[in-house]
Amino acid sequence: MAKGRTTLKQLASILGVSISTISKALNGSHEISEKTKRRIVEIAEMYNYRPNKIALGLKSGSTNTIAVVIPSVQNSFFARALYGIESVISDTQYSTVVCLTKESHKKEVDNFDLLSNGVVDGFIVAVSEETQKLKKFSHFEDALNDEKHIVMFDRVIDSISCTKVITNDYKAISETTNNLIKSNRNQIVLVSAINNLNVGMQRTKGYSKAMLEAKLKPVVIEANRNDIEKVLKNYVVNNSLDAVIALDTDASFAAYKVVSELKKNIPNDIAVIGYMSERIAPYLTPELSTINQHSFTIGKMAAKMLLEQLESKENNDRTLVVDSTLSQRKSS
């Protein structure tokens, strides 16, 4: 058996047939007899032949490959979303290549520039924090102009015309705030380490709307993930509050740590509701009430939407909304 990967030309030489005959046989062409097909497939497997997907893509216009471009897999939301994407793609002829931007605009642009050049048929993307902060979106526009399909999920850009799968962030936080108000909490503080992201902005708007409608003063504490604990602690030491809504995992952990260090009781003194993995939240003390975004479902929907576009060869842009739900636990 040959070592390494055998080329199509080498395989043709071994079998004593033309490259065209091998290509047709491996693609199931009716022009080649079943006996010849079986023989070619058998030898191709024996000699470790694998077709060059990029070369095939240049000829056919399709590589059957999808790029998933996300900030991180350490973030449980994106890890679960990726699992949802793979659960759909794995049942098709498509394969995936996963690219991590680490919240970098440059990495995101580099990934799009590389993969748009005949390597993939489409993209599933959650936009990096730096891209949103810089408001530089030309790499998405360039990919669309090159007739690449794009589906954005969770972190989306409103000005880019593509299919999007999002959660009802505005509504979810507005309803969560109203529930706290109805339970006689009227000094509710919002804590966010994602104020540069569209999702953070939408959640903040939902909170502010609910507070103002109840004639209560909105208090929004924003800081980067490294400083959020210090900024929150400074506020709690010097001000009165009876509830915290944390918009991300870093803010949720910061709230728990600050309240604990200041010897305040959750939820009697301060109720806490946050965003955190459903696999972690029940193991905090007390169990953290969370807003569940259903990231696995979001990933599945994003994959299905992209597959529909790839199969139909059309860009039927839509925005699909997945309802978030409140998982009520002992912290609120």
Image (tube, grey):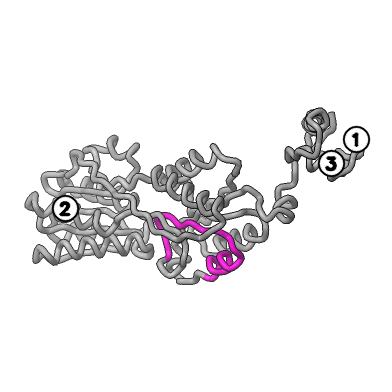
- Say if 299 sits above or below 48 in the image: below
Q: x, y percentage for residue 109?
A: 57, 64
Residue at x 58% of width, y 60% of height = 148
Residue at x 32% of width, y 45% of height = 276
Q: Nearer the viewer, residue 7 or 70?
A: 7
Foreground disc of the pair 3, 1: 3
Disc on the earlier residue, 3 or 2: 3
Q: x, y percentage for residue 292?
A: 30, 45
Q: CA distance from mark 3 to mark 1?
A: 13 Å
- Left or right: residue 254 versus residue 148 is left
The amino acid sitting under disc 3 is: Thr
Residue 100 visible in this rendered orientation of the protein:
no
Q: Residues within 10 Å of mark 2 (few under 14, many from 20)?
A: many
Q: Are marks 2 and 1 in contact (CB under 8 Å)?
A: no
Foreground disc of the pair 2, 1: 1
Q: Pointer 2: what residue?
A: 243
Residue 200 part of the magenta segment = no
Quarter placement of the N terminus: top right
Q: Residues within 10 Å of mark 1 (few under 14, many from 20)?
A: few
**Magenta-highlighted residues:** 138-157
The amino acid sitting under disc 2 is: Ala
Q: Nearer the viewer, residue 273 or 262?
A: 273
The amino acid sitting under disc 1 is: Ile
Residue at x 59% of width, y 63% of height = 147
Q: x, y percentage for residue 302?
A: 45, 50
- Left or right: residue 260 versus residue 67 is left
Q: Are marks 3 and 1 in contact (CB under 8 Å)?
A: no
Q: Pointer 3: what residue?
A: 21
Q: CA distance from mark 3 to mark 2?
A: 71 Å
- Left or right: residue 127 versus residue 196 is right
Q: Pointer 1: what residue?
A: 14
